[in-house]
Amino acid sequence: MVLAGGEAQRFGRPKQLADWKGKTLLSHVVDLVETWPGVESVYIVLGARAEEIMDQADLSGHTVIENLEWQEGLASSLRAGLDFLIGERSVKQALLVLGDQPHLTGEVVPKLVEAQKRSRRPVVIPRYRFTRGHPVLVHRSIWHELVTGLNGDQGARNLFLSHPDWVEEVRVDAPPPGDIDTPEDLERLSRLK
């Protein structure tokens, strides 16, 4: 599930539509996620300027979920996405991906899945040294609790901290790639491989 519902206030325009190597940033992230091992479907949560983004980003073949409460922050997009997925009975787990992280790779996905099988914990998070990152693997068994407990602009971070028994961490060798909040971030990250 690609979370891309924010207003991008610091960016000054919809960052989902920023150019990233010849396509929109959001299209790039969606295309990337689609190639990851084990990913069967890509769900995209939009909020601010959703119609404009749907008109300009190539999201064909994917399910778009509209978050009408996007002003409440990241948690509202996560709630909207998980609430939708609860109705998708065949979906047992979801990878949570931020739509402004174009350098994420799917290399860690098999490790996340294996760690969830081994630990039987509903949340698996990659960690580089002391920093947690994305994608985050979340099992269906806690989706209802997340939907009712999420608020603000921190996503699920606070809930995961208050429920350490839910979380398994997987060590990764590379630091999180960072996200794009400003045009300067876009320029800096576009210079990376």
Image: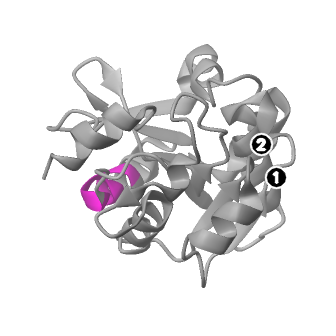
Residue 110's place in the image compared with 186, above or below, is below
* Prevalent SS, magenta region: helix
Name the residue type under label 1: Asp
- At 74% from the left edge and 58% from the top edge, which residue is drawn? 50
Q: How far across and down, in percent of the image, does residue 187 sit?
A: 27, 41
Q: Which residues are magenta?
A: 106-112
- At 28% from the left edge and 64% from the top edge, which residue is drawn? 21
Does dot 2 land on a helix, a strand or a loop?
helix
Residue 44's place in the image compared with 13, above or below, is below
Task: Give the labeled residue for mark 1.
Answer: 83
Residue 172 or residue 69, whichever sits in front = 69
> Spatial distance from mark 2 to mark 1, Cα to Cα?
6 Å
Quarter of the figure that contains the N terminus? bottom right
Does dot 1 land on a helix, a strand or a loop?
helix
> Can the viewer see residue 96?
no
Residue 115 or residue 136, whichever sits in front = 136
Task: Give the labeled residue for mark 2.
Answer: 79
Q: How far across and down, in percent of the image, does residue 25 sit?
A: 43, 58
Examine the image and state in which quarter residue 153 appears. Answer: top right
Asked if marks 2 and 1 touch (Cβ < 8 Å), the reply is: yes
Name the residue type under label 2: Arg
User: What colour scheme has been applied to the protein in the rendered image?
Assistant: one colour
Examine the image and state in which quarter residue 66 appears. Answer: bottom right
- At 56% from the left edge and 70% from the top edge, which residue is drawn? 57
> Can the viewer see residue 172?
yes
Would residue 170 be found to the left or right of residue 27 on screen? left
Would residue 166 be found to the left or right of residue 32 on screen? right
Residue 160 or residue 101, whichever sits in front = 101
Q: How far across and down, in percent of the image, does residue 99 sit?
A: 50, 51
